[in-house]
Amino acid sequence: VMSKNKSSESVKVVVRCRPLNRKEESNGPAGGIVKLDLGLGQVILRNPRATASEPQKTFTFDAVYDANSKQRDLYDESVRPLIDSVLEGFNGTIFAYGQTGTGKTYTMQGAWLDPEKRGVIPNSFDHIFTHISRSQSDKQYLVRASYLEIYREEIRDLLSPNHGNGRGLELRENPDTGVYVQDLTLCVCKSIKEIEEVMNVGNQARAVAATDMNEHSSRSHALFLITVECSQPGPDGRKHIRVGHLNLVDLAGSERQAKTGVQGERLKEAAKINLSLSALGNVISALADGRSGHVPYRDSKLTRLLQDSLGGNAKTVMVATLGPAPQHYDETLTTLRYANRAKNIQNQPRVNEDPKDALLREFQKEISRLRAQLNHRRWRNKQKKEQVEGEDWERDGDDESEGEEEELDVEKDAEEYVKLEEQRLEREKNAIREDQFMLAEEKQRLLGEKERMMGDLRKEQEATEQLTAKYKAMESKLLVGGKNIMDHTNEQQKMLETKRQEIAEQTRSEREIQQQMLTQDEETLELRETFTSLQQEVEAKTKKLKKLYAKLQCIKAEIQDVNDEHVRSRQELEQTQNELTRELKFKYLIIENFIPPEEKNKIMNRLTFDPEEDQWKFQPLVAAESKSTHLKKRPSSAVGYKRPLSQYARVAIAMGANSRYRAENIMFLELDMTPPNTASLNRSMEAEPSQSPSVDSSPTKDGSVRKSRSWRTPPPPEPPPLSDRAPNRPCLIGCRKRSQTDINSGLKKHWNKEVYDVNSP
Ligand code: ADP
Ligand code: MG
């Protein structure tokens, strides 16, 4: 149900260059390296290191704004048409791209208090709510806002910074509506003031969280999201809802972060900081190229969130911001190339009509449900009243057929009803009190009953009041065209506004015509010309040749530049790859040699890939509850006892203190007879050479129990008499120790299997 026109349009790209700041002015007389042709929409970039003969680089955009440009001009020319589309039900995105300190935040937010310096976001607030206040009264609007930031690939809700337990919010995908942020706070806004408040709250949350505001704001992406839902009766008489999503994006600074010398954890951090931005670059490249089938949207949070805005269902404006200082020539050139590439992206915007997730529809349903409830109450009260009074309670021909537009008088009716009822009950109570023929007990009982009825009545009234309050609150959130918001602009101001918009429109179309003329001019070069003399022909052709030669040089230089850049970024990527490979090998080394295989398998079995999050995750440990109860079951031999017992031992216990059975539940284990080889022990053995073998190496005469002995305590001077070694003397349980050589050989075997070279990439 979401289609209107399948036409495609390209991403609009405008460039804005900020003035030189004081520091840059004092740096030297060189001045700016950026020249702008406002009429043609061209940026001419001078390389401060190049010779005078080298051609300057020229880029053409949809519009360019110089140091003197007004916020309002940029808005009226380049943003207003987009917001108008959002109000019609299109998706729209504006993002500011550029090096830190070039005016992204100035362009998006600006200086709030100075009306001249208000940026795109506050101007769009004015625009949206003014539009609503001036629209027809058959339209209902619902405006809501969210504010989030992406920092180190974590999404943070700026309107409720603490939820998610400090961990980032997650992205989810809905087949109908696309990618969204789970649990993101939505604020329904009824006025400019309210939505400004939302913005301020978010900005404060941003500042509070940052330890270094400059560093933080230059490395995080801030997204302010506004959804405008509009319901209007269609020709079929039913209400149709159109939903426009507006993304206002202040991107992280585009400057290259040097990766050289960064290792391990810090490397990963650095990679994460830049991930969203480099992914955005890759997406733009893939889309601009048009040939590569795969667009890597899934590589980062930012590109997933902006998927519709880049090559999808949205109208998109990119504002590339530049600084004029010569020392930033490379960054400025990179920004211009980036912006130039983005021009080639084709979007397929369409009006979102009657989407399943329209909040406005839910509001309307809830409001009519509450209305029905209130109507029911009213009807019931009326019924009761008729019973009480026995007369018709209707006033002024008020009847049941409640039109939706009719004002509800429930509250008033309810009050009136309660008042009458109270009066009636009071009258009845008095009547009971004055009744002289009634018994005192009976009186008491009836009075109590009336009291109770009064209580019920009050409770009932309270419930009605609550319901009414809820109804009113819900209804106030829906903005009715030309009703909820008063438009205080007078006619003169309105005229002025319209004129300004007309001028902006004209400037835009003039620029378009000029750009067209320029391309036509180039094409006419190819046209066949007739020459009256040879001389003329030579002149004309020489001129042509010179022009073409200059163009060729430009393109050659461009190719060289692009190649250099390509080589540079490739080297960087290779370096990163080497670092990561080394780290990976190191991790493998640890896993293979220091983690028992069964532990490793346990961990591997718990790993699952979460396609939503695009990463590997651990399954919880307590997966199978039945398994754990199974483990806790005692072995049958131990039922009723502290530990497993043999049948024989049970009989023994049953026999009580009979000495015959006393020590039969004993395990018999061989002792380790490997002789110790420490010098001191050898000496002690030498001192008593004849005694030790007779005790230990020969089996004892009775053949059932061998007596243990400690190597440390010297053997008794004389072998004890045989009678002393009774068969039922308990023996110590000896455990054969694994010898050191055994362990060593085992490890060696393990190490020989796979030994990784940590240092080779
Ligand atoms: P970014 O957000 O790109 O890092 P900022 O918006 O913070 O840059 O701008 C850096 C400084 O330059 C600010 O002090 C801002 O007021 C100033 N500035 C930026 N653009 C302009 C402009 N077009 N006109 C005047 N001042 C500007
Ligand atoms: Mg900024």
Image: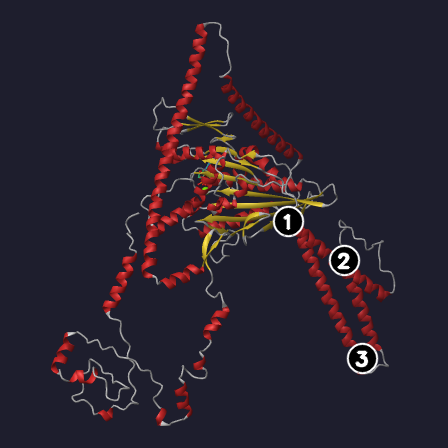
Q: Is residue 415 above or below residue 702?
A: above
Q: Is mark 2 within 8 Å of ligand 2?
A: no
Question: Residue 221's x, y, as percent?
Answer: 47, 45
Structural crowding at the residue carrying mark 1, measured as other residues with C-alpha within 10 Å and reported as few (<14), some (14–19) or many (≥20): few
At horizontal 45% and vertical 40% (from top left) the residue drawn is 282
Tell me the distance, in whole angstroms, between the alpha carbons under discs 2 and 3.
37 Å
Report how many numbered discs are placed on residues in the image. Answer: 3
Q: Would residue 751 be found to the left or right of residue 178 on screen?
A: left
- Can you identify the residue that label 3 sits on? 443
Structural crowding at the residue carrying mark 2, measured as other residues with C-alpha within 10 Å and reported as few (<14), some (14–19) or many (≥20): some
Disc 2 or 3, which lies upstream in sequence? 2
Question: Residue 11's x, y, as percent?
Answer: 53, 35
Quadrant for the N terminus, please.
Answer: top right
- Can you identify the residue that label 1 sits on? 356
Query: Nearest the camera: 171 or 71?
Result: 171
At horizontal 80% and vertical 70% (from top left) the residue drawn is 425
- Can you identify the residue that label 2 sits on? 375
The amino acid type, in three-letter code, at marker 3 is: Lys
Disc 2 or 1, which lies upstream in sequence? 1
**Callouts 2 and 1 close, C-beta under 8 Å:** no
Element on which disc 3 rests: helix
Tell me the distance, in whole angstroms, between the alpha carbons under discs 2 and 1.
29 Å
What's the mark number on residue 509?
A: none
Q: Would residue 152 be found to the left or right of residue 160 on screen?
A: left
Disc 3 or 1, which lies upstream in sequence? 1
At horizontal 54% and vertical 54% (from top left) the residue drawn is 183
Choose mark 2 or mark 1, whichever is in front.
1
The amino acid type, in three-letter code, at marker 1 is: Lys
Query: Nearest the camera: 424 or 346?
Result: 346
Query: Nearest the camera: 201 or 367?
Result: 367
Q: Residue furthest left?
A: 687
